[in-house]
Amino acid sequence: MIVLKDVNKYFNRRKANEIHVINHTSLEFPDNGIVALLGPSGCGKTTLLNAIGGLDRINSGQIYIDGDSITRRGAGKIDTIRNAKIGYIFQNFNLLDDRTVFDNVAIALRMVGIKDKNVIKERVNYCLDAVGIYTYRNKTANALSGGQRQRVAIARAIVKNPRIIIADEPTGNLDSANTIEVMNIIKTISKERLVILVTHEKKIAEFYADRIIDLKDGKIVGDRINDNAGALDYQLENKIYLKDQPYSEKFRGDHTEVNVYSDSDRDAKITMVLRGGNLYISTGGAYNVVDENSNIEMIDDHYTAMDASIYEDNAFQYDRYMPDNFKAKYTSLYTFWNMLGNGFRSIRKFRTAKKVLLLGFLFAAGFTFMGISNILGVYNVEAKDFLTTNGHYITVTNPARSEKLLNQVRKMDGVSYVIPGNSRIQVTLPMNDYYQTASASASLTGSITHAEELTQNDLVRGRLPKSSHEIVIDKLILDKFIRAGAGAPIGLKTIGGFIGRTVIIPNLKDYTIVGVSDTNSPSIFFEKSQTIDVLASAPQGTDESARSFDSDAEMLDESDGSEEDSGSAKIVDLSLASDNVTVKSGRRPEKAYEVMVNNSHREEDGFTIGKTINRKVNGHNLMLVGFYTSDYQDDIYYVDKDTVRQNYIAKQKVFSVYANDTDSVLTELDSAGLSAKINYDRDRETYVQRNADTFRAALVVAGIILLVSLIEMFLMLRSSFLSRIKEVGTMRAIGLKKRDIYRMFTGEIIVITALTGIPGIAISYYVLSNMAKASATIAGSYMLNPMVAGVTFIVLLLFNLLAGLLPVFRTMRKTPAAILARTDIQ
């Protein structure tokens, strides 16, 4: 059955305090009977028992169970052997306190592959009845007395019908009465099974054991067969033998007889009252009163030692209600679904204080979402955060302000069109909807782009332009306007509200917004015929974000007010002038560099028709050809369209190239020796460089939030596990494999993460989303979408699994005996 060959085990090996706790031990055990291990405390009895039962490892030697070695083998294989062949009875019972008596016993059957509920019910109930604990089957284990708990432990050990029972001090925590009852049960089991018993009670061993092995300092010093011929001189604490009491007195009245027995000659004043169905006794506080309900039995006889008759008539049917031809085979208790089910049940059983701790997980989940969202938001720089022009533009330096260079580039493959300058303009949105807002207006800044580049699929509202003064504005511009609350005074809070509204550009006819695009760039789409007029008349954006940045100094200063455009008067295309401009004398401009000025200059020196004036455009002095009058007081120089174009080009040190394939066009520009940069790349680099310190600060804050949240979860999970070590030790000791321990905690961690992580993430998502609607800074600093929520949940789950299973892993490296021996848990 069990064979030990030269087994050795050390504590603190190769240290000054080394203990040779099992010293060259060789033994062979029979197939049945009780083999008792006796010896003083610290002699190695329990250690040897744990080694035999596969609960502890040895340093050298071999241990065989039915020919299978349980040494030098993996824990899983050892668990398979001991789970099928060994039942365990522990001094400290090692029950699952929060489970019922029935469940504590049934778990052993489930681990050996019995799944039929009826078989489990009949077998468990039979074993509970056999040990006298059936009536308590639905009580939780922590509601039982010590004797009752030990009976449950015995039932658990025998229910799977093992060949071997390991009993470590099974009566160590019991009173004398329960000691005898438990030993009688164990003796009955030993008739056909091997019971290896460790006890410190020599009388008990010599009465019940069939073989006694004496140990001292880790060595076997005696091994003898016990004939069980003697009696057990074992006074039971709950039995009082009246005839053995040295003092006794009898008192008889007409209707009452009182017998008083005493273990010594002492004075006692006792008052008794019979009233109704009750007996009232008073000793004046000198003695405690104990009645028959206290499990005390008074026997009118002399004490006699117990003999074998106390257990000989007991019987246990080992195979009763077990499946026919049953062969124990380890079966996992946890599939994926009952892992989760077990997790929910475990959480429901949490005490109130522990459930409150789950709020910590909820807050940690919310802050984790905030941290991850912030980190992703900082790293995920989107076009809306940095792009100042249409993403299809390439800015090319033109320090000579050469129109010839523009025409040269316009002919390159892949170039759709070329415009002078950086394409940034500012238009005015009147908000005179109400009397109170009659003079109110707002500015919209964007990148002028040809409407011909748009398709209907690019629109989210409205339609494409059909005339020269219809425009489309990208929602990126409008969203920023709405988020800033600029349209609140007139209730302009949706992009649809912009359809049909007009925008104003100085000296030009009003433009009507007919569509809203979604091109992910801050663009205002005009018909191409309007380009030069709009560029020349509209002010450039004044936002800091409207600036273009590059390492090239010339790119920092894209336009200037040079001497070629000296003077205060604005140069305007006469064809755009209103009808109230009247020629007072001379004529209208008909070709380049001709100008008509306000009649107010007529008497001034230097303003003679047919002569040039002190105003240059592209290096040419303007030729005065006429004077005009107008209702407007503005001092404007009216020229033809070509002069306006020349004037605008002459002021721009850069020009913008629109290309669908910006990379290939950039390569061609580089080949031509031109200094150029894709606006998208330029703006992104500038944004990142400008916000580098902000990024670093945001990442540090987000990292701290994430770290604190994860540390909090780690500490909570670790604390939760430490409170479960006794349960883990018990499960391992009765045969549950490591992989099932991992599954048990994995199920709980998944459930905890789902119950706390999902609402925590959802709350944080909701709060941040609402804050982002009101704050562009929040919107730009946090990435808020379902993907981030999903990523956060996965991060939480993976971290919780790592943090929760790390202490499990560290504990699972220990043997079951070492886990049960933990002194820092109860």
Image (spheres, rainbow, N blue to C red):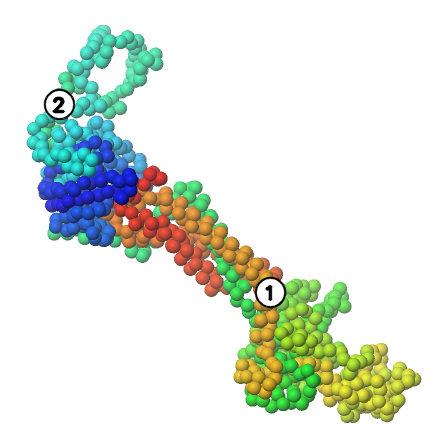
Q: In this figure, which residue is indicated by the disc labeled 2? A: 305
Q: In this figure, which residue is indicated by the disc labeled 1? A: 691
Considering depth in this image, is 594 or 112 the residue closer to the camera?
Answer: 594
Instruction: Give me the residue at 56% from left, 89% from top.
Output: 413
Q: Quadrant of the N terminus?
A: top left
Answer with left or right where residue 766 lies relative to residue 713.
right
Residue 237 position in % (x across, y down): 22, 23
Considering depth in this image, is 195 or 263 the residue closer to the camera?
Answer: 195
Q: Of the residues tagged 1 and 2, which is closer to the observer?
A: 1
Residue 665 position in % (x across, y down): 56, 84
SS at badge 1: loop
- Give the numbered dot on residue 371: none
SS at badge 2: loop
> For residue 486, which quarter of the picture?
bottom right
Instruction: Give me the residue at 28% from left, 34% from top.
Output: 144
Residue 273 position in % (x across, y down): 30, 12
In 3D space, how far apart are the residues under numbered discs 1 and 2 (Cα atoms)?
Answer: 93 Å
Q: Amino acid at mark 1?
A: Asn
Considering depth in this image, is 172 or 468 the residue closer to the camera?
Answer: 172
Q: Amino acid at mark 2?
A: Ala
